[in-house]
Image (spheres, grey):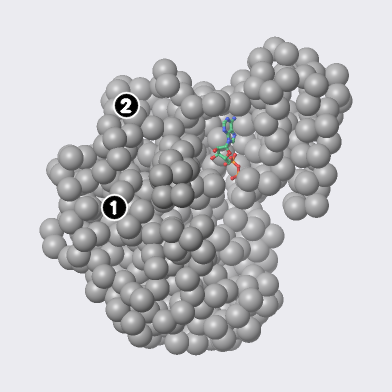
Amino acid sequence: MFSRILIANRGEIALRIIRAARELGVETVCVYSEADRDGPWLEQADRKVCIGPGPSPESYLRIDRIIAAAETTQADAIHPGYGFLAENAHFAEVCLDCQIAFIGPSPEAMSLLGDKVSCRAMAKKSGTPIFPGSPGEIEEEDEAISVAETIGYPVIVKAAAGGGGRGMRIVRDESELIAALESARQEAQAAFGNGAVYIEKFLEHARHVEVQCLGDQHGNAIHLYNRDCTSQRRHQKLIEEGPAPHIDPALRDEVCESAARLIQAAKYCGAATCEFLMDRDHNFYMLEVNTRIQVEHPVTEMITGVDLVKEMIRCAAGEKLSYKQSDVKLSGHSIECRVNAEDPDRGFMPQPGNVETFNAPGGLGVRVDSHVRSGYRVPPNYDSMIAKLIVHGRDRTEAIARMKSAIDEFKIGPIKTTLPLHRRLLECEQFVNADFDIHYVERLLEREEQVTS
Ligand code: ADP
């Protein structure tokens, strides 16, 4: 096992990693920016190192400074958390070159699964369901036209290196195809330095269902069932839950097992998530693989009892997974609400500033993962998420009731948060019946706006 881990991240995920490391008897070093000088999570780390000014390109994205901090504090591993450098294969490679373990996959596995074209090809071989589409990168216009005709419109042009929704174009008929191909290529080239694009079928009404997986360096890979993240606004997840509701257990297991096979084929070490869209007839199509720990990982921890971050650390240290597939048992239902410092009544405007009141809820089956406490100042530089409220209940009905009660107990002020929106979503018919698609939140917000204006 490692003796000291450097955490190349901030906020709640830094705290989450500190907790896991402590349980394993491993010391922690937190790097931080000048804007995070008073970050409450830093008090929990064994050591802290300032790596630069508030803007992340000058601190949390500075590979040279992070490596220097790891070397001076003699950290033998780096956990990247999520966001920042978590899915940067070059960073993973630099860590290894400097003989510091990267707590995540090898750079090769990260690149293989991170590129959507190679990932699709590998998924196909592993029997993981993918969208009908081009077998590889689209190079010729003729090929684009014939692929789109074969799979049928609407189609979507996507960047192989895609992320954050960039380099994507929905195409509804042939007249739009060539222009879309060209503009997607240009956007991808500018954003990722890689203009490769491919085409797949576009699904109008879909639920987002994803499978949590874990792999070790000994060729073992397991899945930890699925989560539903259909409640999104502008592709940003708001509510996640697990297991994904109303999916036949046999189908669920089949898709989850196919995801684990993909992870195994990629010789993957650590936590990975295979994201799928599911249509109304419950057909699954893989979107992408996220090669990091995800924000919504606590949902899986609550329904399986597996500490995902500890498993990641163990596996990076060369240990075998502590669980075989048959050891992973589902229990009850879990829901997570992302509490963002944003004003949902004013176009989700970010709400940096002082948090005078932060009274978190508690009780049976209630978990709050947050770095915030009363008196904390939310800096303007980073993601607006200030807490994750997670509940566990014996079934979905109990989990929803528990979440509503926990939200009512949660007092944060004077800054505005997304809690009131969560409360409304938990009561809306589509959520209650899990009869929804990835655009239902946006439609609901539009309706609300029409009523108030
Ligand atoms: P990125 O890595 O840029 O986030 P994804 O492949 O995860 O790209 O897609 C982002 C979002 O775009 C998805 O969550 C979904 O809402 C939409 N999307 C992507 N591909 C499709 C598709 N084939 N059909 C319908 N929606 C899609």
Task: Examine the rendering and report whether any part of residue 17 can be seen.
Answer: no
Which residue carries the number 2 mark? 247
**Left or right of 333 in this view: 151:** right
Q: Nearer the viewer, mark 2 or mark 1?
A: 1
Q: CA distance from mark 2 to mark 1?
A: 25 Å
Q: What residue lies at 70% left-to-right and 12% top-to-bottom? A: 150
Residue 345 position in % (x across, y down)? 43, 58
Of the residues shown, which amino acid type is indicated by label 1? Arg
Which of the 4 image quarters holds residue 280? Answer: top left
Mark 2 or 1, nearer chain start: 2
Residue 378 position in % (x across, y down)? 46, 77
Quarter of the rendered structure image containing ligand 1 = top right
Which residue carries the number 1 mark? 423
Q: What residue lies at 18% left-to-right and 40% top-to-bottom? A: 397
**Which image quarter is the N terminus in?**
bottom left
Q: Are marks 2 and 1 in contact (CB under 8 Å)?
A: no
Q: What residue lies at 38% left-to-right and 32% top-to-bottom? A: 436
- Mark 2 neighbour class, 10 Å CA radius: few under 14, some 14 to 19, many 20 or more: few
Q: Secondary structure at mark 2?
A: loop
Q: In the image, is the residue at mark 1 within 8 Å of ligand 1 by its beta carbon?
A: no
